[in-house]
Image (tube, rainbow, N blue to C red):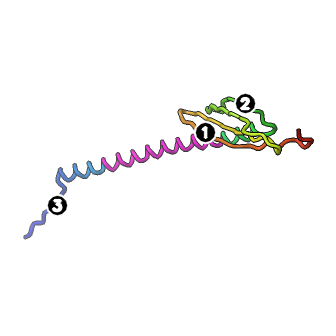
């Protein structure tokens, strides 16, 4: 009669498999952690960009006046600098710089706006 021997895993093979599984687990967790950090940073940058768009729409509507304006919108501190870049017969060209700071992140936005002169006699 023939005896068949069932082949079993050795302790060394089991430990090697566990070590390989642990390395795979830590690599996966590291990737998930990095993705979470990037997602949070992306959400902050998106929030800052939307806040900048809102501030530029609100603060540059109507007649512009040169000056520096500051405020806080939620957890974002902002500084808006409006400078007269040049004046022509057509109107005044303003340089608009907006600096946003939140949670150690900074974003800077720059724009130009031409403010037309009212019709009438030119000097």
Between marks 2 and 1 in the image, the one whose residue lies nearer the viewer: 2
Q: Is residue 5 left or right of residue 37?
A: left
- Chief secondary structure of the magenta portion: helix
For label 2, count other residues whose C-alpha is less than 10 Å away and answer few (under 14), some (14-19) or many (20+).
few
The span shown in magenta is: 22-50
Mark 2 or mark 3: name the one nearer the start of the chain.
Answer: 3
Residue nearest the observer in this picture, 88 or 82? 88
C-alpha span from label 2 to label 3: 83 Å
* Residue 11 placement (x, y as % from top left): 18, 50
Measure the alpha-carbon separation of dots 1 and 3: 67 Å
Picture residue at 65% right of the left edge, 41% below the top: 110
Camera-near label (2 vs 3) is 2
Coordinates of residue 23 in the picture (x, y in percent): 31, 48
Residue sitting at 72 percent across and 30 percent down?
67
Which residue sits furthest bottom? 1
Considering every residue shown, the one lying at the far right of the view is 121
Proximity of marks 2 and 1: CB atoms separated by less than 8 Å? no
Q: Nearer the viewer, residue 29 or 14?
A: 29
Q: SS class of the residue under badge 2?
A: strand
Can you identify the residue that label 3 sits on? 7
Q: Which residue carries the number 1 mark?
A: 108
Which of the numbered marks, if any, corresponds to residue 67?
2
Q: CA distance from mark 2 to mark 1?
A: 17 Å
Res 68 quadrant in image: top right
Q: Residue at x 22, y 49 (%)?
A: 15
Between residues 88 and 68, which one lies in front from this camera angle? 88
Q: Is residue 24 magenta?
A: yes
């Amino acid at each position: 009669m023939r005896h068949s021997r069932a082949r079993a895993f050795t302790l060394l093979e089991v430990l090697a498999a566990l070590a390989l599984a642990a390395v795979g687990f830590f690599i996966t967790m590291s990737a998930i952690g990095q993705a979470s950090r990037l997602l949070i940073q992306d959400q902050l940058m998106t929030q800052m960009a939307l806040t900048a768009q809102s501030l530029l729409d609100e603060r540059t509507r109507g007649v512009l006046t040169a000056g520096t304006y500051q405020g806080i919108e939620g957890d974002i501190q902002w500084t808006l600098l409006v400078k007269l870049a040049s004046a022509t017969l057509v109107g005044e060209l303003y340089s608009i710089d907006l600096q946003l700071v939140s949670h150690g992140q900074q974003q800077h936005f720059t724009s130009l706006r031409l403010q037309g002169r009212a019709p009438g006699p030119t000097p």
